Amino acid sequence: MSIMTSPQRALRFCRICKAKKKACGKELPTCSYCFKRGFDCVYENESDTPPISDNVAEVFKPWSLTLFPMSISTTTLGRTMAYHLHYLYKVVGQSPLQAGKHFLDNFQRWLPVIAPRRLDEHIELSKRGLVGADVSILLLSICLVTLRSGGDLADPLVHHTAVHTTVKTLYAQVQAMMHASASLVQAGIILSAYEYASGQIDSAFISIAACIRMAQVVGVDTAYNRLDAVQKETRLQATSEWNLWWSIIVLERFILLEYSDAGRRAPMAVCPNFDVPLPSDTESNGEYIPTYCTMSSSTVQSSSGLSSFGRQAQAIYLLDRCLNETNQSEQGDPESQLLKLQQLDKDLQQRLSVFMTQTPHEPGLRCGTIATVIRSLYILHKILSRAGSLPVDLDRERWVKSSEAALETITKIMIDVAKHHLDYISRSGVDSLAFCCACNLRVTIKYIEDRCKHGYVCKSLLDDMGYLKTLETVFNRRWRFN
């Protein structure tokens, strides 16, 4: 029997409206309720098969990488991925609800890729098998990035690396069979971040590039155009998508810093113009509230009104500026280039001071912003401390000493940060660390070791380097499994 009464209407309610007891408009191909919330709207025929039982789901081992036939229907693909989702969570000994809470409390505080209310809805619908294949992949990626212990993790087939391979393979298959979506972009960011944290920089570099192109196809890179929409739901959705795009921008920068020492590769995800609103992770009722503050209108003094992620965006603009100006430091007039670097140093130090005093006192470590500025200062003063890069007619010794003093200051800041973080994670767990933490730890440790090699020995720095190495070890034990 056909499900349609006309080319515009379905005969029955869609699966989601029926499950949530909502009045379904029955519009085709997507009802208005599902359209507004970004759900995968499915109308079923009477002949559609019922949900599969738990016993049958045993055939979908998380390490089974059998390719799906390319002619598979959207409904069948969604159901198949739901089986993989169900079984993988069962085997690792946690639930999507537990993983989702852990994700929001930790990963999401660094990169707010999804509105909390939307994630809660996805998890609730997944219990009934009512999510599309892309949402199942998103929830599988969250399982991967929150995976700690339990279930059959002692089995090598369910080790973190096996789970990563499984999730990434399923992600690639779904990506090949359906249109790009925000959920696939979100899953791609999480997978790329996992690869970055676990030291798989080549894989992370490839994954983030594919994620960027998919995000551009979906249109999240232009979501700022809808931030002032009349409809509240549209504004909230646009804010969430704008955070998603900025999460890509932030993650790509840190991957590039690892992939090439000074970040010389130009990023694919370009920062918006200064007159475009900054992102916002200010939350109300599980949704992100937009901010209309732009980089051009925000000053050091007014940045206190920004959200944590808005300040992270400010720091990324400064990082891009730092990379551009240091890469051009040997081009053109040396004196004018040096004046630019001087001003950059002043701006970075001023921002760092403000960010360190304005970080909101709320659960979780909001250290991504400060980490970005500190990394920028290391890059800048690494250039300035090389006497050979300074103009001949300048007082090279004075400049070198000034930069060395600045490097020592930010190194001491990093040591204080390490002490604070070690205390914090002893109570809240290592997952509260932003993934960019390890990058700065390695840079700081290398700076101290290089200073010692060149005959400069500061006993206090050497004594305190143990805090840096201890925190690095804790991070690596959590994320680096090889």
Image (cartoon, rainbow, N blue to C red):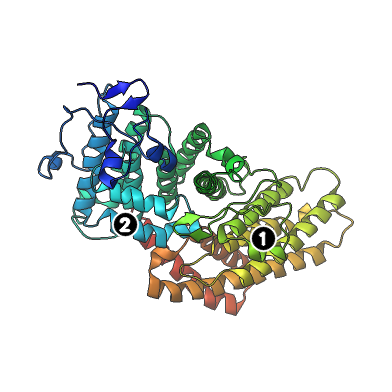
- Viewer-nearest of labels 1 and 2? 2
Image coords of residue 479 (percent x, y): 38, 57
Image coords of residue 321 (percent x, y): 70, 50
The residue sitting at 52% across, 63% down in the picture is 441
Q: In the figure, residue 147 lies in which quadrant?
A: bottom left
**Residue 474 visible at all:** yes
Q: In the figure, residue 28 lies in which quadrant?
A: top left
Which three-letter amino acid code belongs to the residue tagged 1?
A: Leu
Q: Is residue 122 left or right of residue 209?
A: left
Instruction: Tell me how far mark 1 sits from mark 2, CA to CA.
Output: 36 Å
Q: Is residue 13 left or right of residue 241?
A: left
Q: Is residue 230 left or right of residue 214?
A: right
First along the sequence among labels 1 and 2: 2
Mark carried by residue 267: none
Q: Is residue 119 left or right of residue 247?
A: left
Residue position marked by numbered label 2 in the rendering:
99
Give the crowd class for mark 2: few <14, some 14-19, many >=20 residues within 10 Å: many
Residue position marked by numbered label 1 in the rendering:
377
The residue sitting at 56% across, 41% down in the picture is 223
Nearest to the observer: residue 167 or residue 136: 136
Q: In the figure, residue 270 lies in which quadrant?
A: top right
